[in-house]
Image (tube, rainbow, N blue to C red):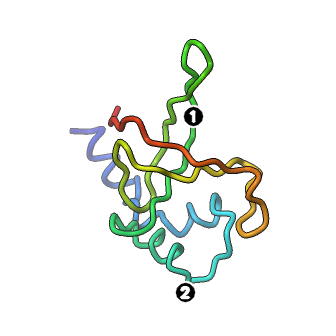
């Protein structure tokens, strides 16, 4: 127990932490009426898929990557096609820094 008790007392739930995480990491308009912002604030599994990728692991030949990230809303499954946004992506302005990819697998570390 001690570690688990500490985590449950001091680490906020995803829903409780959502507003702060949005303020720090979401580059879109913070329109509280926007469906995507509502999904993110609610941490809705039925909402649009939003995953914050924190680390990319290159395959040995450099031809593909495994992404490690946290799901903020929506669900993800193998075979699903997703829009991957680059670091410099600007919503409604820059379609150059994004790509469509197919999820090959999902695992929980």
Residue linked to disc 1: 55
Q: Is mark 1 on a helix, strand or loop?
A: strand
Q: Which residue is drawn at 50% across and 30% down?
A: 66
Q: Nearer the viewer, residue 81 or 33?
A: 81
Q: Which of 67 and 3 is in front in this view?
A: 67
> In x, y percent, where is residue 35?
50, 79
Q: Quadrant of residue 58?
A: top right
Q: Which residue lies furthest to the bottom in this view?
A: 33
Looking at the image, residue 46 lies above or below residue 25: below
Judged from this view, the residue extending furthest toward the left is 1
At mark 2, the secondary structure is: loop
Mark number displayed over residue 1: none
Check disc 2 and report the residue beneath it.
Answer: 33
Residue 89, position as x, y percentages in the image: 73, 55
Cα–Cα gap, marks 2 and 1? 31 Å
Say if 47 sits above or below 65 in the image: below
Looking at the picture, how far across and down is residue 18, in whole percent? 49, 65
Q: In this view, does 45 lie to the left or right of 31?
A: left
From the viewer's perspective, tell me whether residue 72 is left or right of residue 23: left
Residue depicted at x 55% and y 25%: 57
- In contact (CB < 8 Å): disc 2 and disc 1: no
Assess disc 2: are there few (<14), some (14-19) or many (≥20) residues with their C-alpha within 10 Å of its C-alpha. few
Pinpoint residue 94: horizontal percent, then vertical percent: 78, 60
């Amino acid at each position: 127990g001690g570690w688990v008790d500490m985590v449950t007392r001091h680490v906020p739930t995803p829903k409780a932490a959502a507003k702060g995480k949005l303020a720090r990491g979401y580059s879109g308009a913070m329109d509280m009426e926007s469906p995507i912002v509502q999904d993110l604030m609610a941490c809705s599994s039925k909402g649009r898929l939003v995953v914050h990728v924190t680390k990319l692991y290159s395959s040995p030949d450099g031809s593909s990557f495994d992404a490690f990230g946290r799901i903020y809303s929506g669900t993800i499954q193998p075979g699903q096609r997703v829009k991957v946004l680059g670091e410099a992506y600007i919503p409604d302005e820059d379609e150059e820094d994004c790509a469509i990819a197919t999820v090959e697998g999902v695992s929980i570390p």
